Image (spheres, rainbow, N blue to C red):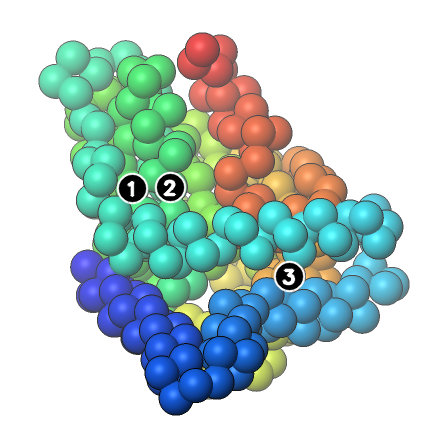
């Protein structure tokens, strides 16, 4: 809930800046300046995405991931322009508890799902997933990882509690799904608990299994610095993992991911992989082919 309150404050501050940018010049008799200022406030997010996409394109130029066309870049950029404000400006700050966990009393024999979000996100990221899982009768627990800027290792007890809750309610091994840093938190949990036999499988979406270039400049949060390619934390995690563990994983990634790049860093060696073209980091969660991968992993048909 701490992250939700922080993002609420940021959204309200952004709205205040937008109102000030429009009203003050307009009332001073400068409507053109008001329009330009409002456009600057509204367009800042899209401009920042443009910068991140330029960096991504440069660092993906020799990556073994399937190459992206200019159409792929444009599609990914536009999709993220629309998807990110919905997540960071509405679902996470104001609707993170709109879909409570679903652990029904008659859930014995059903495979449940533990959903683990990524850096500066909360369970509100998964809201469309939660509706579909509930409609399909699939038990689920969507965690909030706190402290927000703590070590990834701090999240092990949170994931353990979610897994135990579903184990006790269903009698089955749950499927674990992680977006971005959430996939690393799942790996940290597996390493700490040696719980390979307790999970049906793991699906990761845009997870920096081998780090992300952006983490080289991370100053906010221990967890952000732990995602540095070749860093001490990632090397220690890899050293603690048996080679067989990667077979539990299905890694979904894309050459349009503007947060995790080079793109193939989202692949865990030895795991199965699925490339989704023309899609950026947040939109990747909500693509139809990603949801289809969830239903396949659960071994059930998608709900109508």
Q: Quadrant of the N terminus?
A: bottom left
**Residue ID at (43%, 28%):** 200
The 10 Å Cα crowd at callout 1, few under 14, some 14 to 19, many 20 or more, is: many
Q: CA distance from mark 3 to mark 2?
A: 19 Å
Question: Which residue extends farthest left?
Answer: 105
Sequence-wise, the earlier of marks 3 and 1 is 1
Report which residue position mark 2 lands on: 126
Report which residue position mark 1 lands on: 142
> Taking 129 as reference, is 155 above or below it?
below
**In the structure shown, which secondary structural element does the residue marked by tag 2 occupy?**
helix
Residue 220: horizontal and vertical position, in percent? 41, 81
Residue 66: horizontal and vertical position, in percent? 83, 47
Q: Nearer the viewer, mark 3 or mark 1?
A: 3
The 10 Å Cα crowd at callout 3, few under 14, some 14 to 19, many 20 or more, is: many
The 10 Å Cα crowd at callout 2, few under 14, some 14 to 19, many 20 or more, is: many
**In the structure shown, which secondary structural element does the residue marked by tag 3 occupy?**
loop
Q: Nearer the viewer, residue 271 or 240?
A: 271
Determine if residue 244 is in view: no
Hey, which quadrant is residue 111 in on the image?
A: top left
Dots 3, 2 in contact, CB < 8 A: no
Q: Which mark is residue 28?
A: none
**Residue ID at (76%, 54%):** 73
Residue 24: horizontal and vertical position, in percent? 36, 84
Q: CA distance from mark 3 to mark 1?
A: 24 Å
């Amino acid at each position: 809930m701490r992250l939700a309150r922080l993002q609420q404050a940021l959204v309200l501050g952004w709205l205040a800046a937008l109102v000030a940018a429009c009203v003050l010049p307009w009332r001073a008799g400068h409507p053109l300046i008001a329009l330009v200022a409002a456009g600057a406030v509204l367009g800042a997010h899209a401009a920042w995405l443009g910068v991140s996409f330029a960096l991504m394109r440069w660092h993906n130029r020799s990556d073994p991931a399937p190459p992206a066309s200019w159409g792929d870049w444009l599609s990914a950029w536009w999709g993220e322009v629309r998807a990110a404000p919905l997540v960071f400006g509405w679902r996470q700050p104001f609707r993170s508890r709109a879909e409570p966990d679903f652990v029904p009393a008659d859930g014995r024999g059903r495979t449940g799902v533990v959903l683990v979000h990524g850096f500066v996100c909360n369970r509100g990221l998964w809201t469309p997933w939660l509706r579909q899982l509930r409609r399909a009768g699939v038990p689920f627990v969507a965690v909030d990882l706190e402290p927000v800027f703590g070590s990834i290792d701090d999240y092990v007890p949170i994931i353990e509690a979610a897994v135990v809750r579903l184990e006790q309610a269903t009698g089955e091994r749950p499927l674990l799904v992680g977006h971005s840093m959430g996939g690393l938190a799942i790996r940290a949990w597996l390493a700490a608990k040696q719980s390979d036999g307790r999970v049906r499988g793991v699906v990761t979406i845009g997870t920096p299994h081998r780090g992300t270039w952006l983490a080289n400049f991370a100053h906010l949060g221990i967890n952000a610095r732990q995602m540095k390619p070749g860093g001490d934390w990632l090397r220690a995690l890899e050293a603690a993992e048996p080679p067989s563990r990667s077979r539990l994983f299905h890694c979904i990634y894309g050459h349009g991911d503007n947060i995790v790049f080079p793109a193939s860093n989202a692949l865990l060696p030895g795991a199965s992989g699925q490339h989704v073209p023309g899609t950026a980091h947040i939109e990747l969660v909500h693509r139809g082919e990603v949801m289809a991968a969830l239903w396949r992993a659960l071994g059930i048909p998608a709900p109508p």
